[in-house]
Image (cartoon, grey):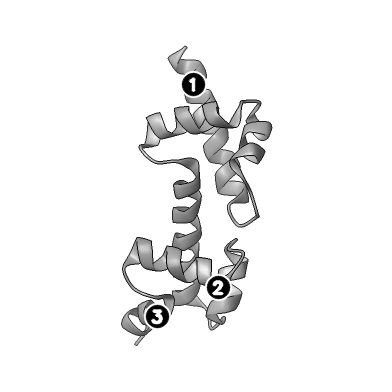
Amino acid sequence: MASYQTTLIEKITIYLTKNYCNDIKVNDIGDAVGLHPDYANHIFKKAFGTTISDYIAELRIAHAQRKLLTTDMSITDIAYECGFNSIARFNATFFKKIQCTPREYKKKIVK
C-alpha cells in the first residue's frame, strides 16, 4: 500500500510541477491522478506536511522570485505569469511566504 501511495504522490507532484502556473484547483489534481480531491490532499499533506494549495503557492512564489531576479518584467506581469489571478493575491501570498513585498524583495536583492 505504501508503494501505491508513493506512486500517487509522485503523480501529484509531477502534475503540480508541470501546471502550477495555470489556474488549477485541488479537484483538477484529483481528476488528473484519478483520486478524490480530499484523499489526494490527505496523502499529499501526510507526505509533505503541507496542503496542495500551500505547495502550489510555494512553487508560484519561488518562480516569481526567480523572475524578479532575472528579468525586467513588471511585478504585475510576473504575478499573472506565475499563476496568480490578481495582484492583491500575489502580494499577500508573497508577503506571507517571504515577509516582504515583491517590490521590497527586488530592491533588497537586485542592487
- Relative to the observer, which residue lies in front, 18 or 42? 42
Q: Are marks 3 and 1 in contact (CB under 8 Å)?
A: no
Distance between the Cα atoms at labels 3 and 1? 40 Å
Q: Position of residue 28 (x, y in %)?
A: 66, 40
Q: Position of residue 1 (x, y in %)?
A: 47, 11
Mark carried by residue 87: 2
Under circle 1, the secondary element is helix
Q: Position of residue 82 (x, y in %)?
A: 57, 63
On screen, 11 above or below 91? above
Number of numbered discs visible in the structure rendering: 3
Q: Image quarter for residue 33?
A: top right
Residue located at (57% from left, 81% from top): 73
Mark carried by residue 5: 1
On screen, 86 above or below 5? below
Q: Choose the circle earlier in sequence order: 3 or 1.
A: 1
Q: Quadrant of the C terminus?
A: bottom left
Most extreme residue toward the bottom is 111
Distance between the Cα atoms at labels 2 and 1? 36 Å
Q: Choose the circle earlier in sequence order: 2 or 3.
A: 2
Q: Choose the circle earlier in sequence order: 2 or 1.
A: 1
Distance between the Cα atoms at labels 2 and 3? 16 Å
Residue located at (46% from left, 71% from top): 91
User: Which residue type does callout 2 highlight?
Assistant: Ile
**Residue picked out by circle 3:** 106
User: Which residue type does callout 3 highlight?
Assistant: Lys
Q: Is residue 32 left or right of residue 98?
A: right
User: Which residue type does callout 1 highlight?
Assistant: Gln
Residue located at (59% from left, 69% from top): 86
**Of labels 2 and 1, the one closer to you:** 2
Under circle 3, the secondary element is helix
- Relative to the observer, which residue lies in front, 18 or 90? 90
On screen, 104 above or below 43? below
